[in-house]
Image (cartoon, grey):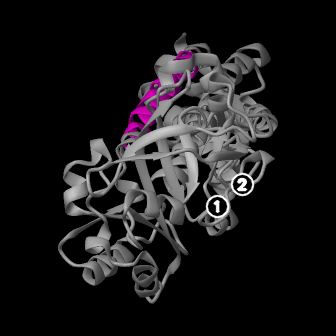
Amino acid sequence: MSNEYRKGGTGTLIKIAYRNIWRNMRRTLFCFTAVGIAVLFIVIYSSMIEGMIKSINDTVQTYELGHIAVVSSQYDNESEYMPVQYPVANGKSWKKLAAEIKTIQGVREVFPRITTMATLHESTIKHAMLWGLDIKNETAANHFNLTNRDDGLIEGRWPEPGANECAIGRVFSHKSGFTIGDRILFKTISAQYSEKFLRPEVVGIFNFDYIKIDENYIVMDIERLQNLLVLDEGTQSLIIYTDDDLQTAAIASAVKNILGEGSVVTEWVDNYWVSIMQAASSLYFILFLVFLIVASFLIINTVVMIIHERIKEIGMMGCLGMTRAEIVTVFFFESIFMAAFGALAGVVIGGMITGLLANYPVRLMEQFGSQFAEMPLSNAIFFQFSPLLLFRAWIMGVVVASIFTLIPSLKSAFVEPVEALRR
């Protein structure tokens, strides 16, 4: 036997280990189940967490910062009040600023945005946000409805450039009773600190599937809002989209050089919630490790029982010339096989589940309401199906289980052949 092993090398040890795991089918299946359930949990929750991260990233990029956002330093100091008195670059034409910024390599689009508060009259809703956009170009470049991947318009049309028109969200329309053809009377404060009244006609209703916008925003053409707020051609902020959302640092620096010290340039990755979710990823990794370690205890107990049951067999191996390292290798590979097959089962079942769930959104806002209201989450979160995620879960299951079963495997090395044969 020893000479046969010497010819086969480690491959023979692996064959022996593989055959051994099927000697007690029931115990082997228990080990498969323990590791498989742990890996299944990892796959499903990793897929959901990746979906939440993607939702937050998409929401921040679409509605808040783009890939890079530019405001004046005075606005940044008072941003909670959303003042319009501090336009970018002291009120310089946003079109000229956009033309300069577009000369930077890697910049795809530059859009102006204005967000300010309004007090509504003759309405059950008393306060709303005015959102001035370059509507024609923004809706062509962005998918405002993150679920359907379209501009989000469900009824009517978008306001025409310069027209006294607006569009409102589906939830806003339902709560206020306003519909297409109605006029909304509101008051706001201009850049000259004067009260401004306007009564735009509702020409469109949208559904962005983002509750913050859908229930509280009135969308107007940027030119009409500029005139109302006495901003001339200036804008409150500039939103920049790049060719690669992960390579924004160099572009942000170049934008800063163009606009000077009076401007604040913010990358989307610096958003509070984006940073929180990135930091939380390491905590989830630790949680997954705990689940795998707990599952590994069944394999540890199994290996200890196997060694106890095969004590005479281990003695025979030693008498036939197998070294302690070779005996340990056999038991260690048994542990690896049990972990690998169990993890594979978890990955296959988890992959089927997440692949199915990836087509059906989880609507957190409908199920949990205000608990997620502060987070920039789209109402529809999709599980993320990824072969890389499945492979990572499988590797994680095999490595963790194998490492923790190495210790009981070493126990077989300290069995003395003569003493073992006496039992």
Prevailing secondary structure class for the magenta stretch in the rendered image: helix
**Coordinates of residue 268 in the picture (x, y in percent):** 41, 57
Q: Secondary structure at mark 2?
A: loop
Q: Find disc 2 in the rendering and name its residue.
A: 151
Of the residues under marks 1 and 2, which one precedes in the sequence? 1
Give the residues in magenta: 279-301
Query: 168 and 378: which one is in front?
Result: 168
- Of 122 and 248, nearer the camera is 122
Give the Cα separation between the discs numbered 1 and 2. Answer: 7 Å
| Residue 65 seen in the figure | no
Q: Which residue is painted at 26% across and 61% down in the image?
A: 86
Q: Is residue 222 magenta?
A: no
Is residue 187 depicted above or below 64 in this figure?
Answer: above
Q: Name the residue tied to disc 1.
A: 142
Looking at the image, is 101 positioned above or below residue 368?
Answer: below
Relative image position of residue 350 (x, y in whole percent)? 73, 33
| Type of amino acid at the residue the image marks with label 1 | Asn
Residue 288 bears which disc, if any?
A: none
Above or below for 240 versus 297: below
